[in-house]
Image (cartoon, helix red, strand yellow):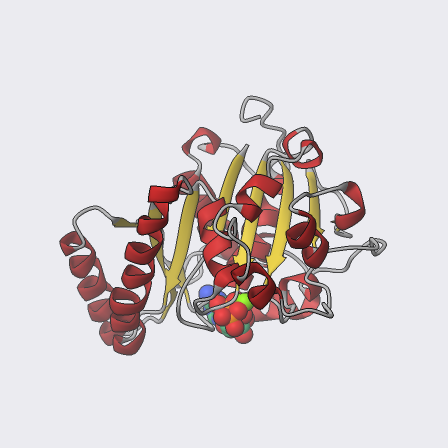
Amino acid sequence: MIKLALVSTKGGVGKTTLTANLGALLADMGLRVLLIDADEKPSLSKYFRLRHPSPYGLTRVITRGLVTREAITPIDLPRLAGCLDIVVSDSPEINLSDWLYSRIDRAVRLKLALRSPDVVDHYDCVILDAHGGAGAVEDAVALAADLLISPVRPDVLSGSEFMDGTLRMLERLDASSAIGAGLGPMKAVINCLRRSNNSRLVADTIRENFLRAQGRVTMLDTVIPDANAYQAAATAQVPVHRFDRQRGAASPSAYEVMHRLAWELIPSLQGVYAGQEPGHVR
Ligand SMILES: Nc1ncnc2c1ncn2[C@@H]1O[C@H](COP(=O)(O)OP(=O)(O)OP(=O)(O)O)[C@@H](O)[C@H]1O
Ligand SMILES: [Mg+2]
């Protein structure tokens, strides 16, 4: 099982959009995928239609330190080769960040919850979506994953916020490794690249900055263009790879881009397409 987390200290960079679309693509490739909406203001929980609501969600998972079937809701997407479920962000009576912050096991609580049999025995991939910012829940999300994915918008502000904010967050979380939490590698992905020279220039500058980050963060070769399809697919509550398959357009289709992204993140999926059953990746 692989655990991915979408993290960034900056809001609105595309974490939820990528979590939903990557999760749905992997499920369409035949994987059993569990999404976790760890944003206290739910947005991933509303991204797709849900089949029937389960009685519990994130609050129960964090306060119990365990994931059980009653905290998992099936997502209503027809014709999935695998499966796609979610732990929704519920409306907690308590402030989860404050609750978690007061716990001595705050760094590892979510990581250990993901070792529950109802996760390990039923899923090939878990994808966690955190709020854009820094707090106890966001730290727990980052420390629960094997691989961190951080979308960066190709503008000067986002680039410098990434270098300052996200790298500082990594350094702080690296210190948690001392208490056994461990932090996975981070891959940054340029999201919302416009077809303008300035945007390309900034993307190249961000790439150069990463080279200077001495391997702590690597930059994915896959670049996600700024395209209406991402918003339109979200409005229609369908995965973007199903929504935009157009070939020969000026920029690559979301179908192509999302496949490239999945293959780069999970190389064992190379050559597997949505609608095929991979079998060997489990
Ligand atoms: N590649 C893209 N092209 C065009 N629009 C995009 C793209 N990716 C994301 N968006 C849009 O950008 C907006 C912000 O995206 P999203 O909500 O996924 O960001 P976020 O990082 O989860 O934000 P927050 O930090 O508030 O949780 C949304 O309106 C989304 O549709
Ligand atoms: Mg979000």
Residue 229 as seen in the image, left or right of residue 175: right
Tell me the residue at 55%/62% (across/down). Answer: 16
When the figure is inspected, residue 219 is found, relative to residue 17, above or below; the finding is above
**Camera-nearest residue between 192 and 124:** 124
Where is residue 121? Give x, y as percent. Answer: 68, 28
Tell me the residue at 45%/57% (across/down). Answer: 139
Where is residue 266? Give x, y as percent. Answer: 44, 36
**Camera-nearest residue between 248 and 25:** 25
Where is residue 35? Give x, y as percent. Answer: 63, 50
Tell me the residue at 73%/69% (across/down). Answer: 91
The C terminus: image quadrant:
top right
Where is residue 208? Give x, y as percent. Answer: 16, 58
Residue 260 as seen in the image, left or right of residue 276: left
Number of numbered discs: 0
When the figure is inspected, residue 224 is found, relative to residue 275, above or below; the finding is below
Residue 194 lies in quadrant: bottom left
The N terminus: image quadrant:
top right
Tell me the residue at 56%/47% (across/down). Answer: 109
Q: Is residue 245 visible?
A: no
Give the residue at the far top of this rendering.
Answer: 280
Residue 262 as seen in the image, left or right of residue 76: left
Q: Is residue 106 visible?
A: yes
Residue 32 as seen in the image, left or right of residue 140: right
**Camera-nearest residue between 57 and 150:** 57
**Camera-nearest residue between 181 and 170:** 181
